[in-house]
Amino acid sequence: LQKNGVYFESSKLYENKIPEWIKSYLSEKDYKIGNKASAMLTEFLGTDLTKIAGELTKLTILVPKGTEISAKLIEESIGISKDYNNFELQSALMNKDVLKANRIIKYFESNPKNNPIVVTLSVLYNLFSKVLIYHSLKDKNPQSVARSLGVNPYFVKDYQQAAQMYNLKNAVGVLDLLRVTDMKSKGYSNPSVTHSDLLKELVYKICS
């Protein structure tokens, strides 16, 4: 493999480090990518750097050097919807946008293979865990918040908004809702309700 092909080896990165890794990887090849697009790729591809590098290489083949890898290009080439994904669901719930959240869940319902509930619940648990941490911070300086939450400073404003929408008690309550929904999604006390209906119920309760 090392003799005849590309050998890629790296220690595993935490998910919150992946968007910056993507930016750095593309920058070395003279390409750019925005925060939303890199977050979309992270959500869809996970933390497997070899897999991510492979998909990025495919994207760079499609456009000339110096080009920005856009969310639209990712949608068309990899199959990730730029409007209906967990990143956008997270954004909708941060703003208690029930209509947008339900549109996304409807899309998930029609594409269950690419949008498993276990991933969605994990993303939302991570979100509200960070909201909980945000409330506990004494230093609300954006750079300090970014370090404490392990997020790109660009996204700090989103967590500030979420913290305004969900106080400490609300955030704890949402985490409890997520735990219950996770149990139900695995069949506990829920022999027949679909994953889509579970998510609709969850969104309703979160935003109530």
Image: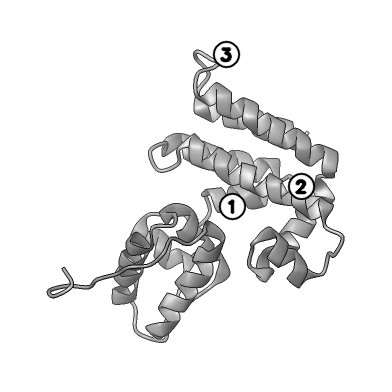
What residue is pinned by disc 1?
Answer: 88
What residue appears at the point 69 percent right and 46 percent down from the top-left corner?
Answer: 129
In depth, the one of 111 and 54 nearer the eye is: 54
Q: Earlier in the sequence, mark 1 or mark 3?
A: 1
How far, Cα to Cα, is label 3 from label 2?
Answer: 28 Å
Going from N to C along the chain, the mark reached first, 3 or 2, is: 2
Residue lying farthest right? 138
- The C terminus lies in quadrant: top right
Residue 202: percent from left, percent from top: 65, 31
> Residue 206, image x and y in percent?
72, 35
**Front position among marks 2 and 1:** 2
Image-based side of 40 in relation to 150, left or right: left
Is residue 131 among what the camera can see? Answer: yes
3 or 2: mark nearer the eye: 2
Residue at mark 3: 189
**Circle 2: residue type:** Leu
How far is disc 1 from disc 3 in space, using C-alphas?
Answer: 29 Å
| Residue farthest to the front, as pictured | 11
Using the image, determine if residue 202 lies above or below residue 84. Answer: above
Q: Residues within 10 Å of mark 2 (few under 14, many from 20)?
A: many
Q: Which element carries disc 3, helix, strand or loop?
A: loop
Mark 2 — residue?
A: 132
Residue 179, given in percent of the width and then of the height, sits at 63, 30
Which corner quadrant of the image does residue 207 belong to?
A: top right
Report the number of discs.
Answer: 3
- Amino acid at pointer 3: Ser
**Separation of disc 2 and disc 1 at Cα?**
20 Å
Tell me if 60 is positioned left or right of 177 in this view. Answer: left
Could you tell me which residue is drawn at 16 percent across and 68 percent down?
Answer: 1
